[in-house]
Image (cartoon, coloured by chain):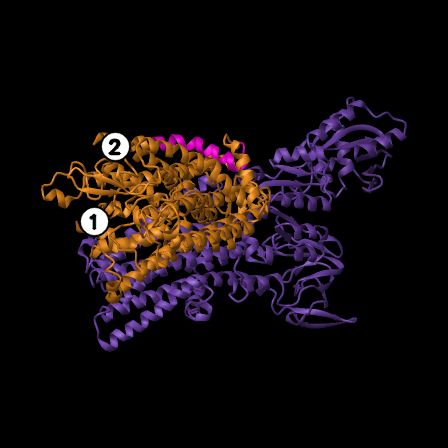
């Protein structure tokens, strides 16, 4: 997670906007989407009428006007609090998305019409239009490069300052609106309809209109609606029970009991939790195409990770020089360096670096007049022809062997042993020859990212199986897999191998997540339950996946899984808290209802609340203020600790269930002490 | 006093020790028929043949439920006709008349749903013919129906992914032949040895000690009492049930009968563990149920042995405990134990009058039935627990950061909808009907007068009587707070409705959930999966049940037994 993580949960301007929204959302048509709060709205309205009636007639059989007014106000505030929770979550998500989108609005675009170039506003670009960008231009909209190559600064989106290369054809052809071209010129075709880019979809998702409830949210809403219905029955039947026992119960008391018992806490926070989940993903620079994808991420059983870039740092590095016997080590190293000085590949550079560490001074090496031999697929080797005619070559062992044997030299047994050793240790051997005589071997090793073992350990504790995907041979793959601590690997992987592996896992009932960028990854991304496409990837890959990672960071999958788990846990713990609250609320309100007519039931007033009125008011006030108190938790999410499911359940049950039972006893008593000064 | 407690402890120990091997037997019966009762196979084959049943036919959950409901409708008509016409049928030496249609409706429904709520008295309301061919027959087959439903659910839970959940007819038959029948036979023999009558003669003429002449009812009692207890039926042969000296003559028969109530419901939980090969899951479920049961037993035994403080204030000796409505040969402790045992299960037989229990004991009895999941009726007891298990799994699953799954199956909106409806139905039925009767009592005294006044006691206790009646009906329990004049049109009819809703809605829902889950893809367990066989999860389930099921009755109970208790 990078720069765009705001420090405060409640920035001032968002709060003001959300307060306004809290009132707007009182519209019953909006409230209807949330059955629990909708019912609260209905009873609040009833309470409003009772209050007016009490004021108009001056009758006291429903309690004093002041008391009724207070109950009404507290209920009204409860509604506002619940709306505020949703509004602030929406506002934060929107603000986050807006800040990403701002960069791309109203950028001038050089539209290509025939062979003419016309400058138009980016908002007027349509899908299929072609525009041109030069150094210094901001790319107006998402697209794919048709012609040319450019280095592009994507820091506006990813926060990463190093420029990246994008070129026509292949997997690195897509460009994102808002990023800046640093060099060269490219011709780009628009791939999205304005208003349809992923960010736009995300913003729509956060805003109420197109937000669909996720399957789990629906199931939870059913359960909560069920709980609400139980209490409709409990409260409605209380009236005839009270008639039988000759007790009069005021409308305010009925409504208070009802509102306190139904799960308003989780009901009020439920949508905020869902939005906050997507928002947290966005803060991690991941754009989700649906809320469901975040939820599914929490369930992932198997994680497919590419070796390069995820488990190992970029490319292989030279780690050791092995001269054959009879060759002086220093002169061998010198020869290796000579062959690599003009080699721009990462391997070549790492050989020079390793040589420097071994004490060779680069400026002592004279390469003037020498000729560089580039690596080609046919020769499978590279090297240098020096001024004095010495030919140094380095390359795959079979290529060098063939070359030296063709010249009539023997392939030494010693070299064969060295090659075997290096391979079985997960390294790649680079055999070096001088004038067709083999003089030694350079060992290249994959460097495993520091800290990656711990991350895999964490995943294992979460119950997630990690699978490494690599083009390496099985021996190397196995070695790296063991060293990095992944559970399984796919060696010599072709794109269809990924697909088959995903299908196999899914047939066993597992949920699979993967990350990909290339067009040939697209089918696998679509097949995976959570497919994260890199923003640098092709349009096809981005369309196929259900998330897009703006950072192009393959380890992001791990974060996504945790965000998903956090989302579900927050729902579960707040539901538990909300339901556990009922215990105390029963003990506050039931004695209050009957104490007047059945004094014996005063024994149930274990909190020793001051009077029936103060008891009822305290309970509804507690019920209202617990919502804003829990908003920060709903927005941040409950912390996930990979300690195993049983330990996690025990922990959360103790914290949220335990406090759910105890906190309201304390809270209601404290509020009662204040309220009792007036009632 | 110490011997009384010893009797209670001995009985519980006997239950625990014997339910384990019985559970193993039951699991074998349903799983592969390799149990030691397999010599009954020819009998079963004969039954399948004359009924035209193919026992190997696999049913999906819909066909399974259809079979269950169809046979129940058939039995309803069978029972109605026999009860109304019993006056004209044989085996009626005492010349008892047929039942009125509303009473026959109530009786027939009540026995068909394994409730055995009795708005009649066995001595005068039935003949030997209907005792045997309605009452006893229903007591066997309705118990077997519950067990068959559980067998189907077990099969659904055990399978990885399946469309079918076994054959209802086969489960029904083998439940009778291999479990209920042999056990009833053993219990019946012991009862006969202890003096329970078994014959077809009419009333005995007996000269009492005072020299007067008394007519004493008898009949095929020993045949009916065992299945009444074992099948969690509870409908007494005599009007006063097992407090009658011929239905329950000695302390030994009392122990045996009380043991018979709980043995199969307990064994069913062990059977689940053996069947699913998840013994730990069974132990954790058993642990929760046992804890709740023992808590109730302790409270009731303590309350009943201590008696009523108001009576002590009158300097009346209460060393024998609260003896109102109890039998001296049984004693306060054993009656208290029975009152809990009969209400945690859906049995409903009594050996003393629940109307006379001290207020808190009465409340425990009611609460047990309102929760209706601690061991419960044969077969259906676990099914009720299963509903709450699904709800607990749902909430706990979320708490560990996964979308909820139970035994490898995802729980989604459809299952939640059914579980919620089932969990709701029980409090709804009880509270709605109690509210209706309270409303009529408070606002239309004319109707109540016309029906004979309904309540023997005014005030809180009167309220408890009405609440108890519907609680007992809805829990398919059948015991009564007998202060209620319940053989009236209103009570016969409303209780009958409560009985039907509360029996079939849960069974349909629970079998449907199991069937739906069985069809889903199996997800193997991982370290992130919620374990449902741990102590923590057991505590979670217990809390869900207490908060959802028990607390919704808190307001109603406050106006009945709680108010009465604090007013003592």
The residue to which callout 1 is attached is B565
Decide whether the magenta segment is chiefly helix, strand or loop. Answer: helix
Left or right relative to B414: residue B304: left
Read off the magenta span.
B13-34
The answer to which quarter of the image holds residue A342 is: top right
Q: Do labels 1 and 2 share a chain?
A: yes
The answer to which quarter of the image holds residue A105 is: bottom right
Percent position of residue A89, x then y:
47, 60
| Mark 2 secondary-structure assignment | helix
Check whether the beta carbons of the residues at disc 1 and disc 2 lie within 8 A of each other.
no
Residue drawn where x is 45% and y is 45% of the image = B141
Q: From where the camera sits, is residue B476 visible?
A: yes
Callout 1: chain: B
Magenta stretch contains residue B462: no
Name the residue nearer the viewer: A246 or B59.
B59
Percent position of residue B531, x then y:
48, 40
Callout 2: chain: B
The answer to which quarter of the image holds residue A360 is: top right
- The first of marks 1 and 2 along the sequence is 2
Residue drawn where x is 76% and y is 56% of the image = A169
Q: What hue does chain B carry in this figure?
A: orange
10 Å neighbourhood of mark 1: few (<14), some, or many (≥20)? Answer: some
10 Å neighbourhood of mark 2: few (<14), some, or many (≥20)? Answer: some
- List the single residue furthest toward the left: B315
Q: What hue does chain A carry in this figure?
A: purple
Magenta stretch contains residue B26: yes
Q: Residue A471 carries which label?
A: none
Q: Residue B5 carries which label?
A: 2
In the picture shown, does residue B337 fall above or below A535?
above
Name the residue nearer the viewer: A590 or B431.
B431
Quadrant of the snapshot with the C terminus of chain A = bottom left
Percent position of residue B544, x then y:
39, 48
């Amino acid at each position: 997670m990078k720069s765009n993580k705001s420090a405060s949960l409640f920035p001032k301007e968002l709060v003001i906007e959300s307060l306004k929204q809290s009132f707007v959302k009182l519209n019953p048509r909006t409230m209807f989407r949330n059955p629990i709060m909708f019912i609260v709205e209905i009873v609040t309205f009833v309470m409003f009428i009772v209050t007016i009636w009490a004021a108009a007639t001056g009758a006291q059989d429903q309690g004093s006007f002041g008391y009724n007014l207070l109950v009404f106000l507290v209920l009204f505030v409860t509604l506002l609090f619940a709306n505020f929770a949703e509004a602030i979550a929406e506002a934060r998500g929107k603000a986050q998305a807006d800040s990403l989108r701002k960069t791309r609005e109203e950028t001038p675009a050089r539209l290509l019409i025939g062979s003419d170039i016309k400058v138009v506003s980016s908002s007027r670009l349509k899908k299929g239009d072609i525009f041109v960008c030069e150094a210094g231009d901001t790319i107006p909209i998402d697209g794919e490069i048709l012609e040319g190559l450019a280095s592009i600064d994507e820091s506006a989106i990813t926060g990463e300052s190093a420029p990246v290369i994008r070129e026509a054809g292949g997997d690195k052809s897509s460009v994102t609106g808002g990023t800046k071209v640093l060099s060269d010129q490219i011709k780009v075709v628009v791939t999205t309809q304005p208003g349809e880019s992923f960010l736009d979809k995300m913003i729509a998702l956060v805003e109420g209109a197109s937000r669909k409830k996720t399957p789990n949210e629906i199931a939870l809403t059913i359960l909560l609606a069920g709980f609400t219905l139980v209490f409709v029955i409990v409260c409605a039947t209380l009236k005839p029970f009270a008639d039988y026992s000759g007790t009069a119960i005021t409308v305010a008391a009925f409504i208070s009991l009802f509102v306190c018992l139904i799960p308003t806490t989780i009901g009020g926070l439920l949508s905020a939790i869902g939005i906050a989940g997507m928002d947290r993903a966005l803060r991690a620079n991941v754009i989700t195409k649906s809320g469901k994808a975040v939820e599914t991420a929490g369930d992932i059983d198997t994680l497919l990770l590419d070796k390069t870039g995820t488990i190992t740092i970029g490319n292989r590095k030279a780690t050791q020089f092995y001269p054959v016997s009879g060759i002086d080590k220093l002169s061998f190293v010198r020869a290796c360096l000579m062959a690599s000085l003009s080699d721009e590949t990462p391997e070549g550079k790492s050989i020079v670096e390793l040589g420097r560490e071994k004490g060779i001074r680069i400026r002592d090496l004279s390469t003037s007049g020498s000729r560089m031999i580039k690596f080609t697929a046919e020769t499978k080797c590279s090297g240098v022809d020096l001024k004095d005619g010495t030919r140094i070559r380095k390359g795959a062992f079979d290529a060098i062997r063939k070359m030296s044997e063709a010249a009539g030299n023997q392939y030494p047994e010693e070299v064969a042993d060295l090659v075997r050793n290096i391979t079985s240790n997960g390294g790649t051997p680079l055999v070096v020859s001088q004038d067709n005589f083999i003089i030694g071997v350079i060992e290249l090793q994959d460097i495993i990212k520091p800290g990656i073992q711990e991350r895999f350990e964490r995943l294992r504790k979460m119950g997630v199986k990690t699978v490494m995907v690599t083009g390496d041979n099985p021996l190397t793959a196995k070695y790296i897999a063991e060293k990095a601590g992944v559970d399984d690997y796919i060696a010599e992987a072709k794109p269809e191998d990924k697909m088959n592996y995903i299908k196999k896992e899914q047939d066993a009932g597992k949920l699979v997540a993967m990350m990909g960028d290339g067009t040939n990854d697209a089918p696998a991304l679509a097949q995976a339950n959570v497919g994260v496409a890199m923003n640098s990837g092709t349009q096809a890959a981005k369309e196929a996946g259900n998330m897009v990672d703006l950072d192009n960071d393959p380890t992001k999958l791990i974060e996504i899984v945790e965000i998903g788990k956090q989302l579900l846990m927050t729902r579960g713990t707040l539901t538990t808290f909300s339901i556990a609250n009922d215990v105390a609320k029963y003990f506050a309100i039931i004695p209050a209802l009957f104490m007047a007519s059945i004094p014996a039931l005063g024994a149930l007033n274990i909190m020793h609340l001051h009077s029936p009125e103060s008891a009822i008011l305290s309970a509804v006030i507690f019920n209202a203020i617990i919502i804003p108190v829990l908003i920060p938790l709903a927005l941040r999410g409950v912390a996930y600790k990979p300690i195993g499911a049983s330990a996690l359940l025990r922990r959360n049950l103790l914290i949220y269930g335990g406090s759910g039972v105890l906190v309201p006893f304390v809270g209601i008593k404290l509020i009662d002490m204040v309220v009792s000064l007036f009632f | 006093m110490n011997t009384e407690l010893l009797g209670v402890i001995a009985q519980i120990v006997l239950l625990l020790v014997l339910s384990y091997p019985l559970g193993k037997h039951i699991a074998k019966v349903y799983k592969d028929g390799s149990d030691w009762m397999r010599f009954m196979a020819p009998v079963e084959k004969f039954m399948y043949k004359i009924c035209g049943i193919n026992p190997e036919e696999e049913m999906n959950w819909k066909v399974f439920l259809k079979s269950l409901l169809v046979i129940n409708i058939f039995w309803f008509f069978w029972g109605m006709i026999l009860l109304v016409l019993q006056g004209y049928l044989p085996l009626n030496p005492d010349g008892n008349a047929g039942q009125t249609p509303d009473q026959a409706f109530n009786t027939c429904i009540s026995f068909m749903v394994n409730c055995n709520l009795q708005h009649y008295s066995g001595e005068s309301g039935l003949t030997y013919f209907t005792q045997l061919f309605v009452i006893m027959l229903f007591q066997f087959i309705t118990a077997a129906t519950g067990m068959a439903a559980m067998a189907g659910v077990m099969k659904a839970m055990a399978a990885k992914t399946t469309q079918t959940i076994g054959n209802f007819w086969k489960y029904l038959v083998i439940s009778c032949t291999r479990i209920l029948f042999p056990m009833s036979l053993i219990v019946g023999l012991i009862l006969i040895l202890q003096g329970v009558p078994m014959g077809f003669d009419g009333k005995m003429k007996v000269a009492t000690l005072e020299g007067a002449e008394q007519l004493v009812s008898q009949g095929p009692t020993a045949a009916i009492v065992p299945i009444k207890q074992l099948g969690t039926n509870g409908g007494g042969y005599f009007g006063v049930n097992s407090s009658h000296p011929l239905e329950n003559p000695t302390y030994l028969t009392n122990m045996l009968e009380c043991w018979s109530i709980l043995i199969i419901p307990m064994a069913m939980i062990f059977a689940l563990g053996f069947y699913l090969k998840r013994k730990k899951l069974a132990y954790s479920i058993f642990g929760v149920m046992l804890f709740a049961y023992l808590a109730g037993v302790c409270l009731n035994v303590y309350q009943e042995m201590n008696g009523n403080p108001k009576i002590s204030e009158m300097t009346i000796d209460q060393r024998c405990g609260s003896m109102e409505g109890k039998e001296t040969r049984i004693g306060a402790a054993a009656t208290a134990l029975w009152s809990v045992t009969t209400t945690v299960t859906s049995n409903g037989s009594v050996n003393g009058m629940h109307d006379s229990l001290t207020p808190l004991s009465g409340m425990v009895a009611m609460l047990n039935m309102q929760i209706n999941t601690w061991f419960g009726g044969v077969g259906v007891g676990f099914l009720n627990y299963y509903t709450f298990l699904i709800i607990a799994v749902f909430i706990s699953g979320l708490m560990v950061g996964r979308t909820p799954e139970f035994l490898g199956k995802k729980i989604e909106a459809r299952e939640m909808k059914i579980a919620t409806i089932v969990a709701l139905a029980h409090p709804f039925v009880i509270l709605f009907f109690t509210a209706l009767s309270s409303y009529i009592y408070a606002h239309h005294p004319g109707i109540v007068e016309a029906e004979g006044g309904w309540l023997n006691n005014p005030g809180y206790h009167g309220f408890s009587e009405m609440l108890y009646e519907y609680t007992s009906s809805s829990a398919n329990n059948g015991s009564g707070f007998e202060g209620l004049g319940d053989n009236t049109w209103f009570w016969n009819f409303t209780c009958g409705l409560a009985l039907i809703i509360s029996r079939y809605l849960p069974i349909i829902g629970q079998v449907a959930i199991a069937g739906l889950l069985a069809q889903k893809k199996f997800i193997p367990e991982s370290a992130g999966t919620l374990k449902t066989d741990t102590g923590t999860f057991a505590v979670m389930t217990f809390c869900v049940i207490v908060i959802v099921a028990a607390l919704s009755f808190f307001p109603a109970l406050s106006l009945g037994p709680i108010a009465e208790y604090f007013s003592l």
